[in-house]
Amino acid sequence: MSNKGRKWKDTSNHWTKNPIYKETLKEMAKKLKGRKPNSGSFKKGYISPRKGKPLGWIGHSTPHTEKSKKLMSLNRKGKHTGINNNKWKGDDVGNVALHSWLKRQLGFPNKCEFCGFESDDHHKMHWANKSHKYKRKVNDWLRLCVSCHKKYDLTFIKKNKII
């Protein structure tokens, strides 16, 4: 074993072999300010109150029953959703988050409102915004197939000369 980087030549790993061992003890005594050093947190013969209990079980006198868990879950449902959520942004939300909010409100579209095309594939049907302002108004959205959505957006772009 190499002694490179060590202040002493002893290859032993114990800190009491350090030449400044006594100075270190004095510094520790100053920090304790007259208190006794910790003699260890475990006493001989001590039995932990957690002995035999599962690891995830901390601080409960008895674990919750399935019935009480169900009641607690029902009590919390809907309390921190939508406007009641502390991270609610209102209309100042991104496009992806707005579409996921809309899908939670209205579900997935399955019939085009223009051509009548029906599909169970969610990738062939889109939600299109009527006003093109992307606000959180449920009645401001259309169910369109991909081709009708493209035509709808292109006519809006041409009318308003956005390009």
Image (cartoon, rainbow, N blue to C red):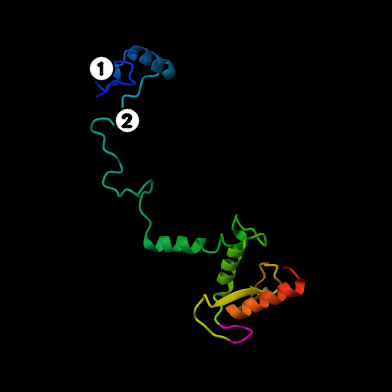
Most foreground residue, 156 or 62: 156
Residue drawn 72% across the image and 74% down it: 156
Residue 2 in the image: x percent, y percent? Answer: 27, 23
Residue drawn 57% across the image and 83% down it: 111
Mark 1 element type: loop
Q: CA distance from mark 2 to mark 1?
A: 31 Å
Most foreground residue, 16 or 3: 3
Residue at the outermost right position: 160
Residue 96 in the image: x percent, y percent? Answer: 58, 64
Question: What is the count of numbered marks?
Answer: 2
Compared with 102, 144 (above or below) is below
Confirm or deny contact between disc 2 and disc 1 (CB under 8 A): no
Compared with 49, 24 (above or below) is above
Instruction: Report the quarter where the C terminus lies.
Output: bottom right
Q: Which residue is mark 2?
A: 41
Amino acid at the residue labelled 2: Ser
Q: Which residues are magenta?
A: 111-116
Amino acid at the residue labelled 1: Asp
Question: Is 27 on the left or on the right of 123, as rendered?
Answer: left
Mark 2 element type: loop
Task: Report if residue 112 lies within the magenta region.
Answer: yes
Residue at the outermost front position: 163
**The quarter of the displayed image where residue 83 is located:** bottom right
Residue 90 in the image: x percent, y percent? Answer: 66, 61
Q: Of the numbered discs in the image, which one, if any, rests on residue 38?
A: none
Label 2 or label 1, whichever lies nearer to me, is 1
Q: Which residue is mark 1?
A: 10
**Mark 1 or mark 2, which is nearer the start of the sequence?**
1
Most foreground residue, 63 or 5: 5
Q: Main secondary structure of the magenta part?
A: loop
The residue carrying pointer 2 sits among few (fewer than 14), some (14 to 19) or many (20 or more) residues within 10 Å by Cα, namely few
